[in-house]
Every structure is written in C-alpha cells, then in structure tokens.
Amino acid sequence: MKTKYSPDHELISTREVEIILEKLTIKTENEIIPLQNSAGRFLAQDVSADRDQPPFNRAAMDGIAVRSEDLTAGISRFTSIGTLAAGQGPAELGLSLSCGTASLRVIKKPGECVEIMTGAAVPDDFDSIIPYEVINRQESQFSLPDKAEAVKFPCGKNIHIQGSDYKKGKCLLPAGTRINTPSIALLAAVGIAEPWVYGEPRISIISTGNELVPVDDTPQAHQIRQSNIHVLRAELSAWGFTRVQTLHSRDDEQELTSAIRNSLRQSDVLILSGGISKGVYDLVPEILQKEGVRCLAHGVTQRPGKPLYLGTACSKNAGLVVGLPGNPVSSLINLRRYVVPFLGTIIAGKQSGSEIREVMPWTPIPVKLSEEIRFKARMTYFPAVYLRRHNDGVITAAAVNGNGSGDFYSISRSHGFLELPAGQDHFEPGYTAPCFCWGPGSVI
C-alpha cells in the first residue's frame, strides 16, 4: 500500500482518477426541504400533475367573451351581462363552469357577452374573446367596427384551453431533475410546498501546517494566513454543497490523528489540504493508513496538483477521502476538477456510467484558445484562463500568467482553467479545450 507520494512511473492519469470516482458511491439520506430553499437541489421524487393546467378555459386577453356562433351568424353588436376578473367564479354571474360548479345557466340569447379580464375562467357557452383594442364601447354595449373583423375571432381565440399545457396525472418532473426557477413554478402549481430532494453529503475540510495562522491574526515573518480552508469551502458552497465543517491542525501526529479520526466518523467526505507530499512533516498518508483508509491513488500525471491522494474508509462514515496539495492553486484546481463533479453526481442521485455524462452545471464548457500555449512536460496541463464571450457566441480563453501553484493572486483574475491533454506540447490559437469554471457565478 502506497503511503508516500508515488514516483512518476506509478502516477495515474486524469481519466483514471475519474474512473476511480465513478466506482465510488456515498449513501445520503433524502430530505424534505421548504420550496423556497430548493433551487439547485435534485428531486428524489416524481412530480405529477394533480389537475389539468390550465384547470379551466382561461382568458388570455382583456376583452369580451362571446360565442363564435354569434360571430358566424353576422352579429357584430354585443350586450354585457357582467364582468369577470381573475379569481372570480362565473357562478357569481349565474353562469356555469363545467370543470367545477354544476351547470347553473345556459345562455341562449344571441348577442350577449361577458366582460372578462386576463386569467379569469371563461364561462361555459363562451368560446372566443375579442380584446378591448379592436371593439367600440358605449356603456354596456360593444360593437365591432367592421363585420369582416368577426372572422378573426374563431372558436378558441384568445383562450388558454383547459389541459392544453398538461393533463392531470402527467409526470411533470421525474426524480433526478435539478430544480431551477421554472421548476419552482411547477412545484408550486401542483401544491408541493416541501419537495423530497436527494441529500447532501456531509463534508469535512482539514487544513494542515504549522505555518498557518487565522485570517484575523497578524502573522510573524515566517508565517502566513490560512486561505485554502476558506477558498475550498467557498468553492463547494458556490456549487450548492453547504454541509461543510472546517478545522485546522498543526503538523503534529497526535493532533492530526485526532482531527482525522473524528472527521472520518462525522463525515461522508473528508478533504485534507496539505501534508500529502514527500516532506518530513507530510504525515497525512501514514495517519490515514493507520486509521483504516484504503489508498486508491496517490499522484496524478498533471500540473498543477500532481500529489493528489484518493482513498476510501468503508468501515467508517467517510466514503471518500481526498488529500489535496497545500499550494493554493493546486488545491483549488483538484477540488474543482474532481471533487465537485463527484459530489454533484451524489446530490443528483445519479449512478456511475454514461448516465452522468449529461450536461450538468459543473460540466466543463468548450472554449477556443485566443493565443498559443506551450507546455513541455508530458502530462495533463491545467492553465488558469481568462474568458471572453464574442458576439457570435464563441468563448475564447487566454492564459493568466502566474508564478506557480503558490500564486493565488494570478488565479483571482481567472474564470477557471483548461484541461490540455498529455503528450502534446504546443496548442495553437483556435484549439478547442474544455474549461472548468469556478463556481456558477464565474461562467460568462
């Protein structure tokens, strides 16, 4: 079992990392949440229509409701017998609505009409609406300026027909659907105030390092302020993963062992930042081994982020253990490239395989290089880039110059990073590559 950073010949590829993660599952408890908090979550239930939509013939214009047979008969003058607003039942005018109240009155007298507002229920025996804009009015009398206008208002004109959107019993949103703002409208329309959604995994982040001090402390000359723990949590939160707890541990075996042991018990996913490379104080792999974590991989043919660690602790709660490099650029890129998509498939309730290849918010977007990129190392390259959207819809990317994986200033000016394949050292302008954008707000 590997406990230290692997030599080059034992490194795995980025695709092999994906395969490892595709085989892992985390069981989370589905939960009921308030509708107003459900945007971005994934349904754990099929949602079906409890009634037709619209549930009645609905007026689509302000005007007068008439019978098309009167128009066909040449009638062009109409007398109002009342007014209906949205939310007002036709029974208040002694009229019937077949989808609800039993028939009360059937109008037979030619030339009668009902003034009706947008959204109101169209009474039985009326099947066309003439908007106010095309008729003349004098008190309760209405007339068409030209009899020839009558042909413009056949049966069903300006009426949103009952059940034309969907019928009662139709499955509107299958389980696994991501709830977006239009979905909220559907859930509300069918009376689901608290939808069932797939549960979020419990995530723990442990940052390591004797040199790190809290953000609000004044560091000594040999110290730096903690940043990884905040940026990792922020990136997870941006993608909707909110059940995150964070803590910091010094490079002390007893302290770090206690932090790892407790986090393994309390979490579905454990993320460690730092302490996984080849240094004397890189204690994480050895402690994880002692705590029963099975190492799945340690080292990937990529830059930055080469000493990535993946493990699983099946005997405890943590279904996935991820060791991220301590350098901030490497740490964030590995989180976004591998951990975010993995967690996304969990909260989406998806299984491994082709099913998860559908477009999800965390899926990379194709972009074209606006300038050449050269990279001599024969490994996958993740350059941070600035994106620009052009009038024709094409998105181009330009590399953001930086000073290595410790330069978080450079990536603060980026929208995300590209994945350029191993084995190629020159990428011409116009080359198309996938771009992994930071949280959804970073997509231009």
Image (cartoon, grey):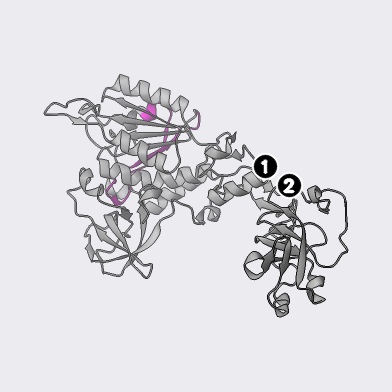
Q: Residue at x 54, y 56 (%)?
A: 354
Viewport quadrant of the N terminus: top left
At 13% from the left edge and 26% from the top edge, which residue is drawn?
A: 220
Q: Amino acid at mark 1?
A: Gly
Looking at the rendered structure, which numbered label has been put on residue 50? 2
- All told, the count of numbered labels is 2
Residue 146 locus on image (x, y percent)? 69, 78
Residue 296 seen in this snapshot:
no
Disc 1 crowd rating (10 Å Cα; few below 14, some 14-19, many 20+) is few
Does the magenta-highlighted stretch encompass residue 178? no
Task: Pick the quarter of the image with the C terminus.
Answer: bottom left
Which quadrant of the view contains residue 66?
Answer: bottom right
In the displayed structure image, the side of residue 366 where residue 424 appears, left or right: left
In the displayed structure image, the side of residue 202 where residue 48 appears, left or right: right
**Whole-percent x and y of residue 5?**
29, 40
The amino acid at mark 2 is Asp
- Residue at left offset 52%, top offset 42%: 347
Q: Dot 1 lies on which element? A: loop
User: Where does the image place residue 310, in percent across and percent down from the top left?
Assistant: 39, 40
At a point 45% along the width and 38% down the height, the residue shown is 241
Marks 2 and 1 close (CB-CB < 8 Å): yes
Q: Which residues are magenta?
A: 288-315
Tell me if 414 is positioned left or right of 73 in this view: left
Q: Earlier in the sequence, mark 2 or mark 1?
A: 2
